[in-house]
Amino acid sequence: MTKNILITGGAGYIGSHISEILIKYKKKIFIVDNLSSGYKKLINKKAKFYKIDILNTKKIKEIIINNKIDSVIHLAAKLIIGEGEKYPKKYYLNNVIGTKKLLKACENTQIKNIVFSSSAAIYKEGQYKVNENSIIKPKSIYGKTKIHGEKLIKNFAKKNKINYGILRYFNIVGSSPSGKIGLINKKSDHLFKNFSKEIMKKKPKLKIYGTDYKTKDGTCIRDFIHVSDIAEIHYLILEKINKMNTSKIVNCGYNKGISVLEVAKEFSRQSVKKVNIIGSKRRSNDLIKIIASNNKLKKFVKWNPKFNNLAKIVKSCIDWEKKSHNI
């Protein structure tokens, strides 16, 4: 059984939800974050926090050894796809060199397991339903840094005889039912966050980019998964690879496609104000449709998603946004 877990990027949206779940399971949590995109107020009070950059190999190694860390969940990364195209060097430094430096810090320590946050952005465009053996051909700089990170993790694990779990995230949305944590990111291109912010306004307008795709309603289709379900997957994968002394790569999604228009309509339905849904021209980097096959995940661990419901997800986003606005 794992006991002392280090989370890099633990002050962020996903990291804070993973901390919440792991603390529920009585794990000791240690967080490393430079707060460049994370927030101190999202850090669980029961976790020990270090404001350190993952490029600082010496300090990270000290933390690992001094706290007898047995497992690492590596989330620290730049992750806005559009930004990655503008600043590729920044993304390479953070996502690739940062991972290399972290792995260097893990060398010759008691680390037994590493869980790495990868992405559906690694898959070749045009594959609508993807499994873990689907063609890998990332279009974006972000996706390229993630597949590079996967290779680094696999090579390090083989060389040092440790276990790894690589989790390929699909579209993570929602907020914790506790109401204590959620997505804060001010520079977000996150659909649910932008819609949540918009319906707080007097005259909400929900903008949809692209309404002429060859889909059921003309808008893009995504596999949206609630962040608390993603957090639970991290716990289950970590415990399983540790217990079985094995490694695994899994897609993390609901195996279900929801269109952007369906999302907009659900936000409109739950809004107390009249909402105007506006169609706009396509964005160049948007995939038309991508859905996760999660058969491998469900075969490997007993995962029963608790939030696989669009109305529940949207409500959690609105509740968090209201709290952020003190409504």
Image: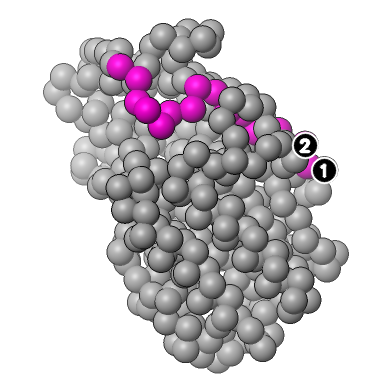
| Apparent side of residue 133 relative to residue 144 in the rendered image (left or right) | right
Asked whether residue 291 is drawn in magenta, I would say: yes
Residue at 30% from the left image edge and 47% from the top image edge: 86
Looking at the image, is 317 positioned above or below residue 231? above
Cα–Cα span, label 1 and label 2: 6 Å
Residue at 81% from the left image edge and 48% from the top image edge: 300
What crowding class fits label 1: few (fewer than 14 Cα within 10 Å), some (14-19), or many (20 or more)? few
Q: Name the residue under label 2.
A: 295
Image quarter hosting the C terminus: top left
Look at the image and give the residue range highlighted in magenta. 281-296
User: Which of the 4 image quadrants contains residue 268?
Assistant: top left
Q: Name the residue under label 1.
A: 299
Q: Report the front residue among 99 and 301.
A: 99
Examine the rendering and report whether any part of residue 67 can be seen: no
Q: Position of residue 27 (x, y in %)?
A: 61, 70
Q: Position of residue 265 (x, y in %)?
A: 39, 15
Asked if labels 2 and 1 touch by Cβ distance under 8 angstroms, the answer is: yes
Asked whether residue 29 is drawn in magenta, I would say: no
